[in-house]
Image: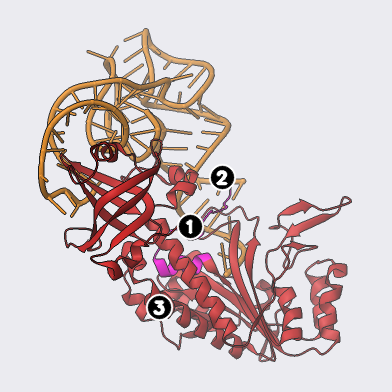
Chain colours: A red, B orange
Amino acid sequence: MNGTRIADLGDHVGDEVTILGWLYNRRSKGKLHFLILRDGSGLCQAVAFKGKVDDDLFESLGRLSQESSVIVRGTVKRDDRAPGGFEIGVIDATVVHEAEEYPIAKQAHGTDFLLTNRHLWLRSRRPYATLRVRHTVIRAIRDFFDDRGFTLVDAPVFTPSACEGTTTLFEVDYFDDEKAYLTQSGQLYMEAAAMAFGKAYCFGPTFRAEKSKTRRHLTEFWMVEPEIAYADLDDVIALGEEMLCEIVARVLDKNAEELEILERDTAPLEAIRAPFPRVHYDDAVRALNDGGIEFEWGGDFGAPDEDFLSRQSDRPTIVHRFPAAIKAFYMKRDPEDERLSMSVDFLAPEGYGEIIGGGQRAEDLGYLQEQIVKHGLPEEAFKWYFDLRRYGSVPHGGFGLGVERTVAWICGTEHVRECIPFPRMLYRIYP
RNA sequence: UCCCCAGUAGCUCAGCGGUAGAGUAGGUGGCUGUUAACCACUUGGUCGUUGGUUCGAAUCCAACCUGGGGAGCCA
C-alpha cells in the first residue's frame, strides 16, 4: 500500500496525500474534529469539517476510539497551530479497524502496568523515541567497526560451559541429558575470530541469571564485543574511546527530535570528546579515600564508588589495571605490578555506571592453564581455547559494550528496561 | 539472598477506626481552531489474600502473595 510518511509531510505542502496510520488522539469541537494521527514516523494533526466530508464519515470520525487504524486522504498545509507545523485538511477517510477501549491513557501510568502492556506501550512517545535512539546507536556501532576493517563473526548463544564462572548462567536441557548454557559473553569465541580475521566483533544478546533488581540490570541484554589481534591495553582503550565518541555524535546528528521528546539535555552529550580521563586503579582508590569514601585496595567498585569516580568528569571515565584477583582468568598481568591486570572499565558520566569492560588477554598457555585450575573451571571445556595459544599466540585484546546501558545514558533514561523493546528481568518475562 | 516502600474503580491516586471518594478512561448530550481541548450528566468496587484485635477494619496487628526501589554481582 502506498502512502506518505508523516515525517515527509514537509515535502508535500499543497499536495493531496494519503496517511496510513492510527488515531493517536482526537479533539472534537462541534462541527470539526481534530484527529492526531500516528504512523510510526511521527505525529500529525488532521482536521475534518462537517459539511466538507461525508456526513456519515464525519459522525463516525467523532466516535472513533484511540488507536483505531485509519487511512486519511487530504491536503497538506502549513499551520503553526498544528503540532509539528503541518496539518491535513481531510477530504476522505477509511476506518480500517475500530479499536477496542485502549488501555494506555494519555495520563500517568505505573511501571508495572506499562511493562505488562509493553507491546502497546511501544506506540507511546517515550518508548518510541528511546527505541529510535537505540536503532541509531546500533547502526553507529556496526558502521564504526565495519568501516575499520572488522569482520562480524557471530558467537553462539548455546555454550557448553561458563566463560567466567557458573553461578549466573541460565541452564537449558540439551540432547541426551546434556546441559547447555545461554551465553554470558562471546569473548572467548571472539579471541578465536581475532586470530582468524585479525579484527572481529560479535553483536548479540547475552544472558545473566543474576538476581539483580536495579535500574542497571536485565537478564537478557545486548552486547557488542570487538577483539583485535596484535593489540595491547592502550589500543583497546583508544578503540573504546573513539567508538563512544562516534556513537554519541551520530545520535546528536540523527535524533534531535527524539532527544527533545525525551527532554534530554544535549549539552553533556556535546561534551563527549576524546580524550577521556584515564585513571589507574591505585589512583582511583586514592581518589575515593580522599573523597571521604571508605574503600580498601584490592576490592571491586560498588555502585556508590563508580558513581563518585564517574562524577569527577563530564566525559566517560576510564579506570584501568584492576587487581587480577577480581578479574576474569584470561586477563593479562601487568608487567609492572604482578598484582594488577591489564583490564579496563569505562564508566559513563552522570552516574550511569559501567558501560564497557575489557582488557588485554593473557597470551601464555602455561599461565592460562594455571589460572583455569585456580579458578576451579573445567579444563576439558577450555581445550579449544588453549589451542589459540598453541598455534600462533599473539598479544590481543578487546572489550564488551552493553547496549542498553549506553542507550540509557545517551537518552537520560532512568532504567535500562526502557532501552530494550521487550525487557527480560528478574520475575518479569511477559509479554 | 538481604533491607526499605506500595497494593482501594479499566488506569493514576486520596481516604488511615464509624455510609466507598476524586481525576481520567468508557457512555449520553453540547460546542467551527483544539493543543493531555472544554462544559453538563452518567456507568463503574470481593479496598491483594488469609487470619487476628475491636461493638465496628480499606484504616490497627501478623503471615503470605504481587509489584517497585536499593545492596551484593555485573554490561
- Please provide the residue range marked out in magenta: A404-426
Please give the residue where the numbered disc 2 appears in the rendered image.
Answer: A430
Q: Secondary structure at mark 3?
A: loop
Label 1 and label 3: CA atoms lie apart by 22 Å
Residue placed at 58% from the left, 49% from the top?
Answer: A426
Q: Earlier in the sequence, mark 2 or mark 1?
A: 1
Q: Nearer the viewer, residue A375 or A354?
A: A354
x, y percent for residue B18: 27, 16
Q: Residues within 10 Å of mark 2 (few under 14, many from 20)?
A: few
User: Total label count?
Assistant: 3
Mark 1 against mark 3, which lies toward the viewer? 1
Quarter occupied by the C terminus of chain A: top right
Residues at marks 2 and 3 on the same chain:
yes
Q: Residues within 10 Å of mark 1 (few under 14, many from 20)?
A: some
Look at the image and say whether residue A241 sits in the magenta stretch.
Answer: no
Chain that bears disc 1: A
Please give the residue where the numbered disc 1 appears in the rendered image.
Answer: A215
Amino acid found under the numbered disc labelled 2: Tyr
Chain that bears disc 3: A
Amino acid found under the numbered disc labelled 3: Gln
Label 2 and label 3: CA atoms lie apart by 39 Å
Q: Secondary structure at mark 1?
A: loop
Q: Which picture quadrant has residue A256?
A: bottom left
In the picture shown, does residue A114 fall above or below A42? Answer: above
Q: Earlier in the sequence, mark 1 or mark 3?
A: 1
